[in-house]
Amino acid sequence: MPVHRPADPCYDVVVVGARAAGAATAHLLARSGLHVLLVDRGRYGTDTLSTHALMRGGVLQLSRWGLLEKIIAAGTPPVRRATFRYADAVVPVTIKPSYGVDALYAPRRTVLDPILVDAAAAAGADVRFGIAVADVDRDRGGAVTGVAGRTRDGQAFRARARIVVGADGIRSTIAERAGAPFERIGTSAAAVTYGYWSGLRTDGYEWNFRPGAASGLIPTNDGQACVFASASPRRIGRGGLAPLTQIVADSSADLAGRLAAADPPPALRTFTGRPGHMRRSWGPGWALVGDAGYFKDPLTAHGLTDALRDAELLARGITAVIGGADERDALARYQMTRDALSTALFDVTDAIAGHRWTDAEISSLLLQLNAAMAGEVETLAALSPSDQPSTRSSPQTQLIRARPVPSG
């Protein structure tokens, strides 16, 4: 069993993974006065696989944290309409102002992630890139007490922490080393291929659904639009322009026509598919956030919104623990709230991603999807303000106060 040396740096929390979920969690923890280390094996500001789209809950979070203005200042276009096409129906939905949100946004990850990382650093977090965490350390009772790994130049790295947070993605090292069991596994694994078109006429988010073929358009930075195609892994294959254009044509003749008149990307990116999962997301000395603990197919484009939501739920729970609250109670409440808000969305996303529905069935699934998201914004809006640093003597001030929304 690895043993920390007295000289190893010690933190309240070590967050492993500096993408959206991890950087947001570190930001909120540091802003609450905790001593936080945020590490990532990659480099600052790099791109990553993403659908980019933020739903109302994600935009609400960025607004509450004072970061939405930076997203807008980076040239991220406002989205005020979403259009759904399925069977013979075209259903435009206007984004109505609610909870202070009058538009949706879909920033590139080269925009969103650095803004969140910079916010964490500005709040006082120690941010380090180029550190690959390979294991967790434990005490004699089995509780996680820190992390061990190597820097980019091969030097050994180790840090102690009261709590280690795994925000290191769907193949999370922290989840594996902590022994986090899967509590729910999806039955579907769709593949997605996507790229960025220039000169493409857009009018907000577009989602197209036909049996065996789904596609979408998401306006993003630099005047570009992310266009994606989703289908079975066999149909997508290795991805690329040919399967994308064919799937777009099968799902929406309207989008296919506009795509043909726009400037295509030099290359596309492909996600080959993976079933969704919900892991147990806490244990003695550790917790999971983002895809590490809860991943679903990207077709419903709700992953980023859930990542920002869960960053706040977990940060409040951890702040309470560091302040003296019972660890089991606070972290179990985090997962209980996450699961209550996520299970119905997980199930309907799994059903849609299976591409086994008919034209007659997809409208009902989309209604279920909308209903599954209904309680999320209300729960987030009801959270007490968290922009004041917590006090160690008043742990109850940062407990999760929102009443969990039933998933059924």
Image: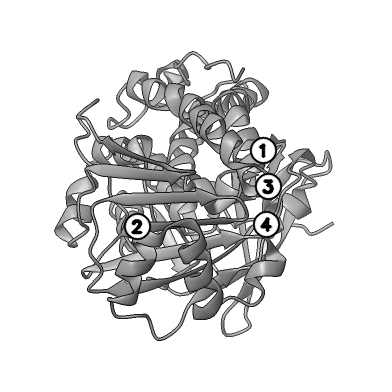
- From this view, report whether residue 206 is shown above or below residue 81: below
Amino acid type, callout 2:
Ile
Q: Amino acid at mark 3?
A: Gly
Q: Which residue is mark 1?
A: 281
Q: Position of residue 147 (x, y in %)?
A: 66, 57
Q: How many marks can you see?
A: 4
Spatial CA distance of label 1 from label 4 is 12 Å
User: Can you give x and y, in whole percent of width and height, for residue 331 in the image?
Assistant: 61, 28
Q: Nearer the viewer, residue 59 or 13?
A: 59
Residue that numbered label 4 is attached to: 172
| Residue kind at label 1, given as amino acid type | Ser
Gap in angstroms between the C-alphas marked 2 and 3: 22 Å
Disc with the residue nearer the chain's start (4 vs 2): 4
Identity of the residue drawn at 40% across and 18% down: 397
- Can residue 35 be spotted in the picture? no
Identify the element where label 3 is drawn. Answer: loop
Residues at marks 4 and 2, CA–CA distance in whole angstroms: 28 Å
The label nearer to you, 1 versus 3, is 3
Label located before the other in sequence (1 or 3): 3
